[in-house]
Image (tube, rainbow, N blue to C red):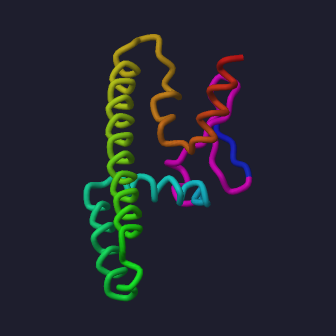
C-alpha cells in the first residue's frame, strides 16, 4: 500500500512508514542530506588535498601568520580527514556484511535492506521503535 504525504513518498511496511526514495529522489534534499553528502565527500581519498591547498593559500595570503600554529591546524585537519576515511571504510564494510546477511537470511525483513540510505535521525527513530 503506497501513500503520499507533503510531497514525500512513503511505503507502508508492517504498520510503519518508510520513505521510498525511488519515487521522488530529490524531494528529501535538506540540511541533513547536505551534511551527509559532505561527510561522504570528505571520506574520499582526494579530500586530503584540501589540506595542502589550504596551506598554500594561507602561506600566500597571510605569510606572517604561517607559523607553528598553522602547522598544528593543518595537522589537525589532516588527522580529521584520515579518521573520517577510516570510519567511512569501516561503515561501508559493515553495511556490505549486513546487506549480505539480509539477502541470504530467509526470515529477514526486506524493508531493512536499504535503511542505510536514510538520514541518521530516521535510522535512530527506527531503532528506538524496534527496541521498545
Return the x and y of residue 49 as percentages of the image width and height.
27, 66
- 85 lies above or below 102: below
Return the x and y of residue 56 as percentages of the image width and height.
29, 79
- Residue 67, quarter of picture: bottom left
- 104 lies above or below 80: above
Left or right of 65? Residue 11 is right
- Residue 123, quarter of picture: top right
Return the x and y of residue 98 as percentages of the image width and height.
39, 24
Q: Residue at x 53, y 48 (%)?
A: 21
Check residue 17 for magenta coloring: yes
Return the x and y of residue 79 as percentages of the image width and height.
35, 51
What is the span of residues highlighted in magenta in the rendered image?
6-26
Left or right of 10? Residue 85 is left
27 and 38: which one is in front? Answer: 38
Looking at the rendered image, the quarter that the N terminus falls into is top right
Left or right of 48? Residue 122 is right
Q: Residue at x 32, y 74 (%)?
A: 55
Looking at the rendered image, the quarter that the C terminus falls into is top right
Q: Residue at x 57, y 41 (%)?
A: 120
76 and 106: which one is in front? Answer: 76
Q: How many marks?
A: 0
112 and 92: which one is in front? Answer: 92
Q: Residue at x 39, y 59 (%)?
A: 77
111 and 60: which one is in front? Answer: 60
- 68 lies above or below 3: below
- 4 lies above or below 37: above
Amino acid at each position: 500500500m503506497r501513500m503520499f504525504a507533503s510531497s514525500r513518498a512513503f511505503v507502508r511496511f508492517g504498520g510503519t512508514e518508510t520513505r521510498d526514495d525511488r519515487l521522488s529522489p530529490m524531494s528529501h534534499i535538506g540540511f541533513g542530506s547536505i551534511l551527509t553528502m559532505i561527510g561522504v565527500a570528505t571520506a574520499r581519498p582526494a579530500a586530503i588535498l584540501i589540506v595542502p591547498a589550504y596551506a598554500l593559500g594561507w602561506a600566500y595570503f597571510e605569510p606572517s601568520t604561517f607559523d607553528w600554529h598553522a602547522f598544528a591546524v593543518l595537522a589537525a585537519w589532516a588527522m580529521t580527514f584520515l579518521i573520517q576515511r577510516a570510519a567511512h571504510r569501516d561503515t561501508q564494510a559493515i553495511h556490505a556484511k549486513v546487506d549480505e546477511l539480509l539477502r541470504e537470511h530467509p526470515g529477514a525483513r526486506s524493508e531493512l535492506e536499504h535503511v542505510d540510505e536514510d538520514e541518521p535521525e530516521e535510522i535512530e527513530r527506527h531503532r528506538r521503535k524496534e527496541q521498545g
